[in-house]
Image (cartoon, grey):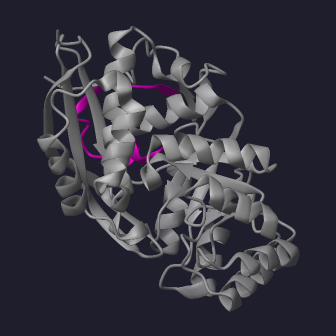
Amino acid sequence: MTSATSIRAVAVAPLDIPLHVPFGISGGAQAMANNVLVTLELADGTRGYGEAAPLPPYNGETQAMALAALRSAQAWLPGRDAAEWRALAAEFSARGGAGCGSAQCALEMALLDAVTKRRGEPLWKFFGGASTTLETDMTVTTGTVAEAAEAARAIRARGIRQIKVKVGGAGGPAGDLARVTAIHAAAPDAPLILDGNAGISRAAASELVRGLRAAGITPALLEQWLAKDDLAGAAALIAESGWRVAADETACTADDARRIAAAGAAQVVNIKLMKSGVIAAWELATAARAAGLGLMIGGNVESMLAMSVSACFATGIGGFEFADLDTPWFMATNPFDGGFAVTGGMISVAGITAGHGVVPKE
């Protein structure tokens, strides 16, 4: 007899969403979200949706890689039981999914959405139900000084308090300092998270710290300025600046969290489901907390679907001091209905009643 949670069909399709402006980080810019949508249909008709958001300038993953990994699962997933989602996720990883973290994430999202939706459980409760709200920042991407100042004013006009600034671009430390100074002048009360995406050298980092200090600017957080394997450099940056440092590209697994803590290389880890999948992110959060590291939730260039899963993850687990779940606002269109609600910078998942609450528009 076929179980109601047996997977009847798996659909995989490109999810291309234009952006208002290119999303620039130290490694390059992306003018469109070239993502992937995966849909699992269960025997009883329940559908679960997942999103892969590869970001080539971030870690080299591409839409083609995510499509290939997810399409390979179409040969063996039908007929399997979605209720065994952990085992299916492990099998996907062993069959090659581990080589594309965003694809791993999309499959796990779709499985969890289908399973929790079928039993009428919101994903934030599945993750622990610790809370239903968190505060997000909004990002000023790489660009000119004038663009940075205007973006900061627009962010504050939206009622968003915290501003994240991409640094490490082509202008070097002087260009970064000019942009951050303009942002600080436009929004003097905004806590600033300065994100280098592993694109800043040790020498440039020291120069930027000196410049910020001379300008009287104290960032709330320095996020992954240095190369992802430079733990000693990150520890030295903490000592030199006296400011809090977050690990992003460095922190993908639970073992990474333990290495970071042992090296004194960060006080916070940025957890992104797209790095290695939902399960790995959960393990990373547990290990980081056990090691005394603070938690941040972030993402790639993701639509409301993936961002709602991250919001459910962070609110459900609880204890996330920082959140960077702003990329749906960079998108020119929204192909989905549902998801989290937002007022200014405050995100609420309380209205999500089953699964992650996001479905494709009819």
Q: Quadrant of the N terminus?
A: top left
Does residue 126 appear to the left or right of 191 in the view shown? Answer: left
Does residue 31 appear to the left or right of 27 in the view shown? Answer: left
Q: Position of residue 350 (x, y in %)?
A: 52, 15
Where is 312 relative to 139, above or below?
A: above
- Picture mark count: 0
Q: Residue at x 46, y 14 (%)?
A: 351
Q: Quadrant of residue 356?
A: top left
Farthest-out residue, bottom: 203
Q: Position of residue 251 (x, y in %)?
A: 60, 60
Does residue 228 appear to the left or right of 115 in the view shown? Answer: right
Front position in the image: 327 or 112: 112
Q: Quadrant of the C terminus?
A: top left
Asked if one can make out residue 304 in the rendered structure from this viewpoint, the answer is no
Q: Residue at x 75, y 44 (%)?
A: 289
**Can residue 329 be found in the magenta stretch?**
yes
Residues rendered magenta in the picture: 324-343
Where is 131 relative to 281, above or below?
A: above
Where is 114 relative to 324, above or below?
A: above
**Can residue 347 be found in the magenta stretch?**
no
Does residue 210 appear to the left or right of 306 in the view shown? Answer: right
Q: Residue at x 13, y 36 (%)?
A: 11
Q: Position of residue 149 (x, y in %)?
A: 55, 63
Q: Position of residue 5 (x, y in %)?
A: 26, 16
Q: Residue at x 33, y 37 (%)?
A: 88
Asked if one can make out residue 115 in the rendered structure from this viewpoint, the answer is yes
